[in-house]
Amino acid sequence: MARLPILEVPDPRLRRRSVPVSAVTDELRTLVADMFETMYDAAGIGLAAAQVDRPIRLLVIDLVDGPPDAEGRSTRNPRVFINPEILEPSEETSVYNEGCLSVPDQYAEVARPARIRARWRDLGWVEHEATLDGLLATCLQHEMDHLEGILFIDHLSRLRREMLLKKLAKARAEAAREKAA
Ligand code: ZN
């Protein structure tokens, strides 16, 4: 397994539309393993293939990234979504303070449908359909936005987006200064 570089704003490659996956191959399975390693290493809960420069309709999510349980078992719950679709978003919305590995260390509240009926394939190419809510619904919608070249900051007002990007630029400049010192 290998950790992959994560594209960050304003990289134009984040703005591409991802193409459907046609089959699960060994290469795809390796990519999924690498994406989980990359996501866990960055302490994220979701990662789209587009964020690691592979514009295909694939994303991984794990909302549980806790320490091992008393028996030493991993408490992780890795989920793979291939060619995900939203069939029915609820009218009711919920608000989460979202972040994104492509917009490092910046967070903002985003309102999205609270519940979604979704369809996707897993790594065994089995089709699933389920109604999702809570953080999983939010996270899936956030990651699915990546497949369309959309970032969570696009859901903010222009003023809020510019403030957030300014904060990011400042944090990057400080990090560069610390590195140089
Ligand atoms: Zn993201």
Image (cartoon, rainbow, N blue to C red):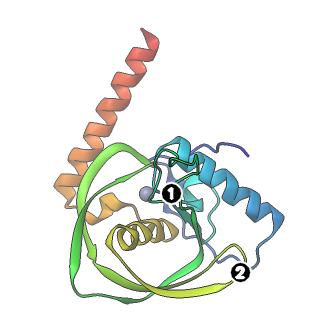
Q: Viewed as shown, does residue 138 lie left or right of 109? A: right
**In front of the other: 175 or 39:** 39
**In front of the other: 77 or 28:** 77
Front: mark 2 or 1 = 2
Residue 156, above or below 94? above
Measuring 73% from the left and 79% from the top, which residue is drawn there?
22
Residue 14 got which mark? 1
Q: Quadrant of residue 3?
A: top right
Q: Amino acid at mark 1?
A: Leu
Measuring 23% from the left and 88% from the top, which residue is drawn there?
91
Quadrant of the image where one finds ligand 1: bottom left
**In front of the other: 56 or 25:** 25
Instruction: State which tag comes first along the sequence, 2 or 1.
Output: 1
Q: Quadrant of residue 84?
A: bottom right
Q: Please state the horizontal and vertical placement of residue 144, each as a whole percent of the image.
A: 47, 71
Labels in figure, total:
2
Q: Quadrant of residue 31?
A: bottom right
What residue occupies the far right of the structure in this picture? 26
Q: Amino acid at mark 2?
A: Trp
Query: From the image, which quarter does the C terminus lie in?
Result: top left
Q: Please state the horizontal and vertical placement of residue 114, each as a whole percent of the image.
A: 28, 78
Q: Viewed as shown, does residue 138 lie left or right of 12? A: left
Q: Please state the horizontal and vertical placement of residue 140, each as a whole percent of the image.
A: 44, 70
Residue matched to label 2:
125
What residue occupies the far top of the structure in this picture? 181
The verdict on label 1 being within 8 Å of ligand 1 is no
Residue 126, above or below 103? below
Residue 173 got which mark? none
- Label 1: how many Cα within 10 Å (few below 14, some 14–19, many 20+): many
What residue occupies the far bottom of the structure in this picture? 88
Measuring 46% from the left and 66% from the top, which residue is drawn there?
143
